[in-house]
Image (cartoon, helix red, strand yellow):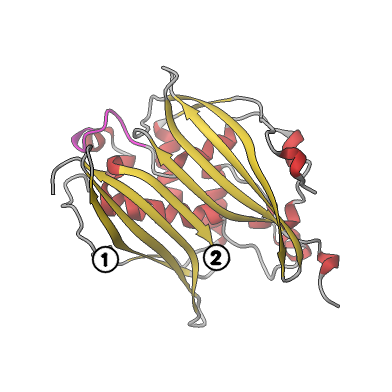
Amino acid sequence: MMVSPMPVLGQKGPDYEVGPLTRTDIVRYAGAGGDFNPIHHDEPFARSAGYPSVFGHGLLTAGILGGYVADWLGLGRLRKYSVRYVAQVWPGDRLACSGVVTNVTAGEDGVLVECTLSVERCAPDGTRQVVLTGAATALYAETA
Amino acid sequence: MADASLIGHESPEGHMPVERGKVAEFARATFSDRPIFTDPEAARQAGFRDVPAPPTFVVASAHFVPSDPGFSAKLDMKRILAGGAEWEFFRPLMAGDELTVRSRVVDVETKQGKRGQMTLITREVSYFDAGGELVQRMRSTVIEMPPMEAKAP
């Protein structure tokens, strides 16, 4: 929230989980984001490319985590957000977002808060696997 | 097959309006149910002129920029995986913003993977507002995996 207090070094972000992800969720994201690579919605195409089924867009996971970090640190404060895709997200997975503050530095414009971020997929069979790692930097204009 | 000749390749310039409906659609698709993305009054109370765009919203410029066969024809979509992305925010984007979108290939790198040679292609997309100010910049990397035939027998 815009009124959220500035997080301190080592502070963890709130627990947040979405899903289970359906093929409909993947298609909804394709339409919203404009990524129509058939590998994400066309089952025969995905199988012909060697995958067991369609899978979620990396940008879908990045978008979910982006919403999480905007909620946690404040959308208007975000200066940088980055993601690396580590593994695929499959229909049926739930996605768990987390974050931790790794650096707090006072600068001329305010206090820069840096955090690392992660998304884990929780499959119906109990498998848990990190699918995305990320980082974000937010500027808190108020003094610490 | 992508190669280093793509470096410097510029896609045709695009124009992207930031619209309330598209913002609400994008927020819903990314599971964000915050009222600031759907309700202009809630957005104003949070200090925004109108509903703000979620952090990764600019990717929706894929809807608005002209298709670029000079780029996409060089990629085999069955072998493409997303590698990563990065956004820099110079100010929040809000409904009513009119963006000019400029995209170019900034890096093409080959790496030896377990299954053969992978190609990493990085594009930088810059978003300018109606006043010509750079308001957001995105870098994204896709990985072209080795051809299926390259798999060990």
With A120 as the anchor, is B121 left or right in this view?
A: right
Please report, as a chain letter, where disc 1 is located.
A
Name the quadrant containing residue B147: bottom right
With A3 as the anchor, is B61 left or right in this view?
A: right
Q: Is residue B28 magenta?
A: no
Alpha carbon distance from label 2 to label 1:
21 Å
From the viewer's perspective, is residue A121 above or below residue A1? below
* Residue displayed at 64% across by 62% down: A54
Identify the mark nearer the N-term, 2 or 1: 1
Q: Say if residue B32 shows up in the picture.
A: no
Q: Please state the horizontal and vertical placement of residue A117, each as a whole percent of the image.
A: 39, 61
- Residue at mark 1: A12
Q: Viewer-proximal residue, B73 or B108? A: B108
User: Magenta segment, which residues?
Assistant: B44-52
Q: Which mark is residue B31?
A: none
Name the quadrant containing residue B83: bottom right
Please report, as a chain letter, where disc 2 is located.
A
Q: Please state the horizontal and vertical placement of residue A69, each as a whole percent of the image.
A: 33, 53
Amino acid type assigned to the residue bearing label 2 in the image: Val
Q: Please state the horizontal and vertical placement of residue B3, each as a whole percent of the image.
A: 77, 46
Which quadrant does the C terminus of chain B fall into?
A: bottom right
Q: Which mark is residue A86?
A: 2
With A27 as the anchor, is B48 left or right in this view?
A: left
Task: Check whether the beta carbons of the residues at disc 2 and disc 1 lie within 8 A of each other.
Answer: no
Amino acid type assigned to the residue bearing label 1 in the image: Lys
* Residue displayed at 37% across by 32% down: B93
Circle 2 SS class: loop
Q: Main secondary structure of the magenta part?
A: loop
Q: Is residue B50 magenta?
A: yes
